[in-house]
Image: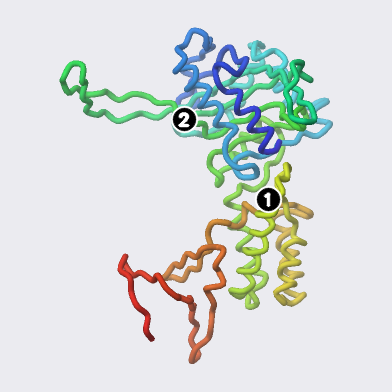
Amino acid sequence: MNEKEIAEIRRRFRPDKSNIARIRGCYVNDKGEIISKFNQLLGLMSHEESEELLAILKKTLSGTIGKNLIDIEFTTQQVLEGEEHKLLMALRNSSLDDEIAVQEFYGRVIQALNMKENYLILLAYDKYDIPCYTEDGEKQEDSSEVFSYFLCGICPVKSTKPALSYYASENIFRNITADWIVSSPELGFMFPAFDDRSSNIYNAVYYSRNIAESHEEFVNTIFKTEIPMPAAAQKETFQSVLGDTIADDCSFQVVQAVHEQLSEMIAEHKTNKVKEPLMISKNTVKDVLESCGVPESRMAAFEEKYEAEFGTNTEINPRNIIDTKQFEVRTPDVTIRVNPGRSDLVETRMINGKKYILIRADEGVEVNGVNINISR
């Protein structure tokens, strides 16, 4: 799914927009025991309560594609014979009314998670009459397809602290006792995917709030498939591969060139409003290294280690390995953050046999908030 398709589904999570009639799920304690189960009609809740509940579920479709939102792809054999896919289809085709399938799903989720805190498993089913649009963008009355899907969110439940509150209507202070609050989803998914504005049972969209944690056991249990390396780990791994293989040839200029050229690709991709996420291969980085004059032997070492860490012919999202909003130079004692568009202000140099990082400072220099003058 691309950003536009995700946004189209996200807009449905309002009481007046969706066909979600109820929310069902269960409450699990930190020992993995089900404390209670619920099947609550939104129509019996206040508008504010139903709106808040849908807003929590909608967060399982939030974040950045490739970082928080990961495409899950099933093989043809899984779709035809896989028990994991059959369970997901049973949940979807029954509108979450197949009790055996629902209870089986709860059990698998609990088996796969080790949350070490209380949490909710939330499930919601929706039917979306996909509207048709004319070439000039006008919405037609008839829908082209009915997209049936369900959303799952795993939400930690945290205890609040007792606090002192002032009740204006009574003109009195009173203690508020500790209570339990439902937090935003830690992970979740939507099945099936909404690709090309149509149902795709060969894919699901998986969500992880923490880009450093992919919950591999959950993914393996629910989808029986591998998941890409977490975005945070991709960045650390790429930095390690680049530094270790380029070694003595890994100069400031090389890292600067990699950052600048990947940033330019990201900016161009955004400007051109390309629907599909931007992906790069090892050859993309090799071209940058070659333009910096890195020896062929170093590039061969880079290619070998890249494949060992990420896999042969694996493509990654450049947003996962660079920060387009930050360019940082760090020593054990000093950290310098530079506007990415002005990394040309920084250079490295050897002076009298010692290594220096030089920053051109024309005007507007402050030290501890005080403007200073550099005269020599």
Mark 1: which secondary structure? helix
Picture layout, residue 188 above or below residue 317: above
* Residue highlighted by disc 2: 156
Give whichever of discs 2 and 1 has the lower sequence position: 2
Q: Nearer the viewer, residue 301 or 315?
A: 315
The quarter holding residue 23 reads top right
Q: Position of residue 53 (x, y in %)?
A: 50, 21
Which residue is located at x 65 percent, y 18 percent? 126
Q: Residue furthest top?
A: 44
Mark 2: which secondary structure? strand
Are the residues tagged 2 and 1 within 8 Å (C-beta)? no
Q: Residue furthest bottom?
A: 352
Q: Nearer the viewer, residue 226 or 242?
A: 242
Which residue is located at x 47 percent, y 64 percent? 337
**Residue type beneath disc 1:** Thr
Q: How is the image coloured?
A: rainbow
Picture layout, residue 180 above or below residue 96: below
Q: Position of residue 333 (x, y in %)?
A: 40, 71
Using residue 77 as the reference point, say whether residue 251 is left or right of it.
left
Which residue is located at x 56 percent, y 34 percent? 187
* Residue highlighted by disc 1: 271
Quarter of the image with the C terminus is bottom left
Q: Nearer the viewer, residue 31 or 247?
A: 247
Using residue 84 as the reference point, say whether residue 259 is left or right of it.
left
Q: Which mark is residue 325?
A: none
Using residue 222 as the reference point, say whether residue 34 is left or right of it.
left
Q: Position of residue 267 (x, y in %)?
A: 65, 54
**Residue type beneath disc 2:** Pro
Within 10 angstroms of label 2, few (less than 14), some, or many (20 or more) residues? many
Using residue 193 as the reference point, say whether residue 80 is left or right of it.
right
